[in-house]
Amino acid sequence: MTSVWLYLLTVLIWGTTWIALKWQIGIVPIPWSIAYRFWLAAAVLLLWLAWRRQWRWPSRRVAPLLLCQGLCLFCLNFVCFLYASQWIASGLVAVCFSTAPLWNAVNGRLLQNKPLAPQVLLGGALGLAGLMLLFGGELARDWDRPQTFWGLGLALAGTCCFSLGNLLSGAMQKLGQTPLQTNAWAMLVGASVIALYALVAGEPMRFDSSPRYVGAWLYLAIPGSVIGFTAYLTLVGRLGADRAAYCTVLFPVVALNVSAWLEDYVWTWPALLGLTLVAMGNVAVFWRGRRPRLVSA
């Protein structure tokens, strides 16, 4: 599949998973919802690999990276996102997620010694201004409610974990590992760790058999995880973490429209301006004097 199709597929799938995340909030404790999602996704991937006769145990060289990827990409970030969705609209969580290119740039500098371009500072300023406009109404109305600030902070923390998972996936692909292989094992690790945490914390192991919860679970596990993560991390291997993360600029456009349709989110002129600034900030981070171009492969 060409990078263009992978790009569009990622945007459409992940732009609509935010509402499914919110629909899972209810009688099932959040850690168990995450575990159910990635256990199912891991099982689907492992069965697919076995059917294709590509199943194999990870090597000792890759195992530590898989463990870290499982924690960052399929455990901690989703804990942050689901708890954030309890306090802020799912579309706004997606807007925070669109700052992933900024996190990739900063983490690439700190962990891989990649140069930090001046446009990163401009992009960061634009993104911060945009988020303040988007959350301005909530912050002004609920300035004495710490939940709003917790929601924003958790969403950004989840995005940082997502960024670290990007870098780990790119490193393993350079070692000859495919996203199908690494995702299967990393999802299994992430789901198992969060389930262990739930048991230790005394969270009851519940399941909601309602059509809404089951539909959200299946959508998040199959399109959202098996297809979405494989498509996105394939882009990370082909284009690099920074260029692949450019597609996160479009996630909020899809997510906020879904939120407006299903959650009564109301677009305002400040919110539209804020969304524009967030998008401009992300574009500025990786602008190289020409229009960003996807490479077919």
Image (spheres, grey):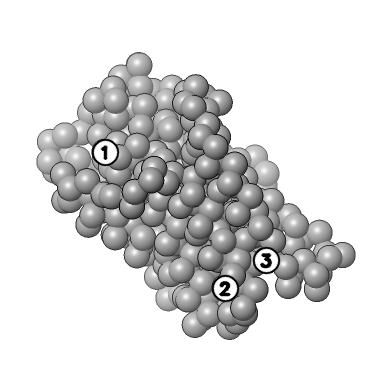
The amino acid on which the numbered mark 3 sits, given as a three-letter code, is Leu
Question: Helix, strand, or loop for circle 3?
Answer: helix
Q: Which badge, 2 or 1, is on the more N-terminal residue?
A: 1
Residue at 25%, 34% in the rendered image: 178
Residue identifier under label 1: 238
Residue identifier under label 2: 272
- Extreme front residue here? 289
Q: Which badge, 2 or 3, is on the more N-terminal residue?
A: 3
Q: Nearer the viewer, residue 264 or 214?
A: 264
Residue at 33%, 27% in the rendered image: 172
The amino acid on which the numbered mark 1 sits, given as a three-letter code, is Arg
From the top left corner, tell me how far across and down residue 213 is, in percent: 47, 69
Q: Nearer the viewer, residue 289 or 68?
A: 289
Q: Nearer the viewer, residue 256 or 126?
A: 126
Is residue 251 at all visible to an observer of this figure?
A: yes
Residue at 74%, 62% in the rendered image: 148
The reply, left or right, for residue 187 in relation to residue 270 is left
The amino acid on which the numbered mark 2 sits, given as a three-letter code, is Leu
- Extreme right residue here? 144
Residue 133, labelled with which disc? 3
